[in-house]
């Protein structure tokens, strides 16, 4: 899918039907024919357009002649509801600004629809910094969602016993935070390279770049805090599970001790030798009474030792 956006007379970024100079091009799940068409219209090397389609690509900066590419990681929600990250390529030259996404990235789609800091499609460098800011803000949004999901799991655990579902959900959240930490670290290094490079040409571009650095630092700190909190929660859940298991084993051991007393008495009186009160009806009740008394004594002893 390819969409084109350009600033209208009212200063708003609107969708247009054909590729024009100083327009923004949004590419999502492209095929080879679409990439070749865009490459021919814009003069961007096909290699740059294909970089983001490999979800194992690492964030980096590249340039060739007047074409510059910024490859970063952006957060997405998978079809199964899990939160992860994928590459996103931002490419621009003197005439075109191109965003390539292997799957839908809400931050990029919203920005290109005119919901970002920069609506002037002719200002490519400012558009780059504004889009990167939108991506980082989406990281912060998804981090808050992860924190809410963690709190919801804790509330469910507090109301009933821990189930495998809660443990699996906690592991999935930890997995998402691991991806976030790696992606934010890489994106932070990209932002630092942009800052150490030519930076912004105008005051508003410099402000956007400074805001990007601050937002990234905040996102990294939030991710670190949430990872530590989630790790502590997972450890606490493991301790609860182990504690419940220990209680069950202790209770079953105590019940086994109590029930073994009548079996021992019955074993003595069931021997194939002469025993007291043999052949007497009251002998049975005496044996039963001894069993009850000894079992009660064992019960009291275990209760005082807090094994029941």
Image: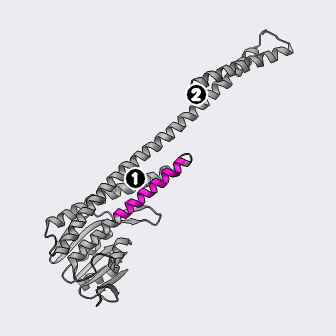
- SS at circle 2: loop
The residue closer to the viewer here, 42 or 302, is: 302
Whole-percent x, y for residue 159 in the image: 55, 48
Which residue is label 1 attached to?
174
In the rendered image, the vertical position of residue 238 relative to residue 123, given as above or below: above
Residue occupying image coordinates x 56% and y 45%: 161
Whole-percent x, y for residue 260 in the image: 67, 23
In this rendering, does residue 32 appear at all?
no
Task: Please tell me whether residue 103 belongs to the stretch shown in magenta.
Answer: no
In the rendered image, the vertical position of residue 155 relative to residue 101, given as above or below: above
The residue closer to the viewer here, 280 or 152, is: 152
Distance from the alpha carbon under mark 1 to that under mark 2: 36 Å
The residue closer to the viewer here, 209 or 271, is: 209
Image position of 85 (left or right of 303): left
**Pair 1/2: label in front:** 2
Whole-percent x, y for residue 205 in the image: 19, 73
- SS at circle 1: helix
Q: Quadrant of residue 125?
A: bottom left
Whole-percent x, y for residue 154 in the image: 48, 50
Q: Quadrant of residue 208?
A: bottom left
Image position of 276 (left or right of 198): right
Image position of 89 (left or right of 308): left
The image quadrant where one finds the C terminus is top right
Which residue is label 2 attached to?
307
Magenta extent: 139-158
Residue occupying image coordinates x 30% and y 81%: 25
Q: Earlier in the sequence, mark 1 or mark 2?
A: 1
Identify the disc placed on residue 34: none
Dominant secondary structure, magenta = helix
């Amino acid at each position: 899918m390819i969409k084109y956006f350009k600033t209208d007379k009212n200063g708003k970024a609107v969708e247009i039907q054909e590729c024009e100079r100083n327009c923004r091009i949004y590419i999502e799940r492209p095929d080879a024919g679409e990439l070749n068409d865009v490459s021919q219209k814009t003069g961007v090397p096909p290699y740059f357009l294909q970089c983001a389609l490999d979800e194992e690509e690492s964030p980096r900066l590249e340039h060739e002649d007047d074409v510059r590419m910024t490859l970063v990681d952006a957060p997405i929600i998978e079809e199964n509801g899990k939160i992860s990250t994928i590459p996103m390529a931002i490419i621009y030259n003197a005439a075109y600004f191109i965003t390539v996404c292997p799957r839908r990235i809400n931050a990029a789609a919203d920005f290109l629809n005119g919901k970002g800091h920069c609506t002037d499609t002719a200002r490519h460098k400012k558009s780059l910094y504004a889009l990167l800011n939108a991506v980082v803000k989406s990281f912060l949004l998804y981090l808050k969602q992860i924190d809410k999901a963690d709190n919801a799991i804790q509330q469910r655990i507090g109301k009933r016993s821990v189930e495998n579902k809660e443990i699996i959900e906690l592991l999935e959240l930890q997995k998402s935070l691991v991806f976030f930490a790696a992606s934010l670290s890489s994106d932070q290094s990209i932002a630092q390279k942009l800052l150490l490079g030519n930076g912004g040409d105008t005051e508003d571009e410099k402000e956007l770049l400074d805001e990007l650095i601050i937002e990234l630092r905040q996102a990294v700190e939030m991710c670190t805090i949430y990872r530590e909190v989630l790790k502590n929660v997972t450890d606490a859940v493991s301790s609860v599970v182990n504690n419940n298991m220990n209680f069950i084993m202790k209770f079953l051991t105590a019940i086994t001790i109590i029930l073994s007393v009548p079996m021992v008495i019955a074993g003595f009186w069931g021997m194939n030798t002469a025993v007291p009160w043999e052949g007497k009806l009251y002998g049975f009740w005496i044996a039963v009474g001894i069993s009850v008394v000894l079992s009660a004594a064992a019960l009291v002893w275990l209760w005082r030792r807090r094994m029941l």
